[in-house]
Image (spheres, rainbow, N blue to C red):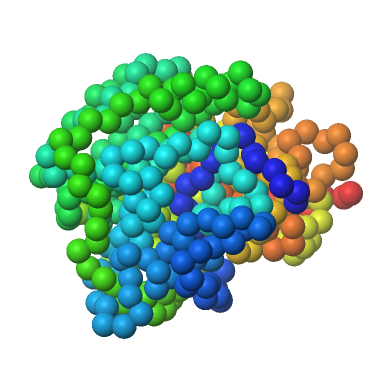
Amino acid sequence: MGKKVISSMAAVVLALWMSGCNDKTEEAAGEKAASSSGEIKTEGAVETDTGVGKNGIALPSSPAFVSEGGEVATMDNVVRAETAKYLAAETIQSGPNTFRHEREGIDLDNQTVIRSNFDAIYSYGVFDISDGLTITIPDYDLLQLVQVLDENSVTIGVAYPGDTLTLDKSDVSYGDHVYLFMRTQPRSYDEKGMEEMRQRQDAVTVKAGSAKPYVSEVKYDVDSFNKLRGELITRAVTEGVIEEGFIDDIKDIKTPQYQMINLAGWAGLPAKHAYYFVVLPGDEAAKNGEPSSVTFMPPNLRYEDSGYWSITIYDEKGWVVTEPFNTNSNKAKKNADGSVTLNFNGAEGVKNNIQVKENWNALFRCYLPVSVEEMVEYRKHFTTQNKVLAVDS
């Protein structure tokens, strides 16, 4: 792909989720070590090293990790170490108590997050909660939310348009800092729609009583962390259940789901806010990238509150490598009976056509489900009865 910025939606930190039929997740194995130098060069430019390497591995240059003498990663601390990696990286980029807004979208030539989410434009920030924190989102008729994650990757709050959310240190399960992850849906992806979206980003206010920069209390051993991280992501292929990993109460930890899901993907919303599941090719021909399709009835979401569904295509390692690579309920054309047919590598002119590569996989995201239990059943039906199968070209 040429140098291009996609203004239609930006990134969430879900990594390679897999296996539709058995309620599982996936991550491609075999991550390669990245350079630990203080600078990262991209297309001739020099960018600040945030300590996060290729495929999300931790680098020794991360302020939260060391090559020798660090705390060995275990099942008890690996999610906290993963969170420390991202909080330290964001602090390098934006400092304390400051949102870093994506203004245009993801640069397809510089994707830094596995299985990026293109459903909304994102903003990120690490905020000091030690003396309290108040988030205010003005009313808005499109999806906008601020997710608040503590240092254990527990979602301690989510604010929506019209909300004022006040939190303090007693709300976190560990530490003095939280990661604020804002999603803002554009009305359209032309300049007018994107400018409105930017104004909506800027309209969100966050007031904190203290502004100490985040510093990890622990220096983690980089090698043991990357090793355990890779093992957990690999296990997620056959064992992971997404909705059991993203939690909003520390008491809800289910080992090993909590560890697998948060290492295979970080900062996903709990299921009552957004429900995710994998869509896989249903036969060898579809897997090989031959023309294929699937027809399904849309999920039951709070569409009246700006809820919507989307599907995004990734390669086997979790990166976007084709165009067009996604669609959603706001732009997909329905059939006469209300169902939706998606085509993959379809003939020219077919509706809802998405391009895929060999060994592709997709993530189906559902924002604002009416019922988590209903979504579980919907996912089971979709992944067993609505298979992506090859069609005659």
Residue 209 appears in the rendering = yes
Residue 297 appears in the rendering = no
Is residue 320 positioned above or below 272 on the image? below
Q: Position of residue 291 (x, y in %)?
A: 81, 51
Side (left or right) of 90 relative to 337? left
Q: Quadrant of residue 210?
A: top left
Q: Position of residue 335 (x, y in %)?
A: 71, 28
Q: Quadrant of residue 269?
A: top left
Considering depth in this image, is 241 or 385 the residue closer to the camera?
241
Q: Looking at the image, which residue is at 50% across and 38% down?
A: 102
Q: Looking at the image, which residue is at 78% across and 33% down?
A: 351
Side (left or right) of 96 relative to 176? right
Q: Position of residue 323 (x, y in %)?
A: 74, 45
Is residue 167 positioned above or below 33 on the image? above
Q: Quadrant of residue 222?
A: bottom left
Residue reaching furthest bottom? 68
Q: Looking at the image, which residue is at 35% across and 80% down?
A: 67
Considering depth in this image, is 120 or 378 the residue closer to the camera?
120
Considering depth in this image, is 132 or 22 the residue closer to the camera?
132
Q: Looking at the image, which residue is at 37% across and 16% down?
A: 139
